[in-house]
Image: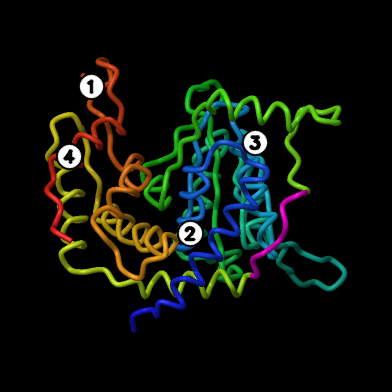
Amino acid sequence: MPLSEEQVDQARRFVASVREQVALAVIGQGRVIDEALVALIAAGHVLIEGLPGLGKTLLVRALARTFDGGFGRIQFTPDLMPADVVGHAIYDPATGQFSTRKGPVFTNLLLADEINRAPAKTQAALLEVMQEAQVTIDGTSHALPAPFMVLATQNPIEQEGTYPLPEAQLDRFLLKLRIGYPSHADEVAMIGAVTRGRAGDQLAVDQVRALVKPQAVQTLQQMAAQVVTDVAVVDYAVRIVRQTRDTPGLAAGAGSRGGLALVRAARAWALAAGRGHVTPDDIKAVALPALRHRVRVAPEQEIEGRDADSLLSDLLGQVPAPRQ
């Protein structure tokens, strides 16, 4: 059933109020904030990539402050074990019984900080969590609280002591966000905010107010699922994904989950913009974060300084969009 104009406007105003609160702490990263909110509305997970000190963890902390639900954080390290993430069974000698100690994944928003610093077996512990929103401990499945969202961070250039994320896990992230350097004006504002009456060097998130209940997030996610997506728009998303498989500069294209990500993210983008239907421009707006981690750039293109974003941008210009 299509959403009413009143429902769409309520959703738009609600998302705008959350965006304003996050922006109180995260200065000059409006696009990244929008994309993080899109992932939340679309019930997806995000991978946030950026150099140290650009606000990756701050973004997650600020978003968590607006959310009146559970928040957990895992600092990924080379010695982190799967049981440290999902939990494990404990034997009690006094009773002769096993009990389950749940890990930090049993929350609503989970910050996986520097996720690529843990070995593959620990990263793999998140696969079931991210795909099925459940954890299996000692043969018993435990459902995670709803809504559930993983927000992972990683440094794109530091390779010492890191383990590249496997393709299967990358594909579980709905969006991959990139945080770049702020503008001159934003950097001046940020430094002024940090040094004003403070001895440390961290932006505080104390001024961010909690606006969102877990039930409200679930309602918003259900509303996004009802945003009308015309078959021509779905066809456009599929043609974009299929073109990634035939582009010479890409050694590997996106799988079918790429098309699903485009449509899911575009519905959330449209709802946040105050529309009850998806347009081709919505597909274009989310194409880079939805596909950049699902394609692999050919070595000769990397030598020439091309990256996934530049190749995908060229591709978007080649795939004709349907008339609105």
- Dot 3 amino acid type: Asp
Q: Colour mode?
A: rainbow
The Cα–Cα distance between marks 3 and 1, rounded to whole angstroms, is 36 Å
Furthest toward the top, the residue is 303
The structure residue drawn at horizontal position 36% and vertical position 75%, both measured from the top left corner, is: 226
Q: Secondary structure at mark 1?
A: helix
Residue 32 in the image: state x and y as whole percent. Answer: 49, 43
Picture layout, residue 123 above or below residue 145: above
Q: Are marks 3 and 1 in contact (CB under 8 Å)?
A: no
Q: What residue did someone put label 2 on? A: 128
Q: Secondary structure at mark 3?
A: loop
Image-quadrant location for residue 68? bottom right
Q: Which of the marked residues, 1 or 2, is nearer the chain's N terminus? A: 2
The Cα–Cα distance between marks 4 and 1, rounded to whole angstroms, is 18 Å
Q: What residue did someone put label 1 on? A: 301
Picture layout, residue 62 above or below residue 52: below
Query: Tag 1: Cα neighbours inside 10 Å, few (<14), some, or many (≥20)?
Result: some
The secondary structure that most of the magenta stretch takes on is loop
Q: Is residue 159 left or right of residue 80?
A: left
- Dot 1 amino acid type: Gln
Q: Which residues are magenta?
A: 207-213
- Name the front one of labels 3 and 1: 1
Q: Which of the marked residues, 2 or 4, is nearer the chain's N terminus? A: 2
- Name the front one of labels 1 and 2: 1
Q: Nearer the viewer, residue 153 or 144?
A: 153
The Cα–Cα distance between marks 3 and 2, rounded to whole angstroms, is 21 Å
The structure residue drawn at horizontal position 61% and vertical position 53%, both measured from the top left corner, is: 110
Q: What residue did someone put label 3 on? A: 79
Which mark identifies residue 317?
Answer: 4
Q: Secondary structure at mark 2?
A: helix
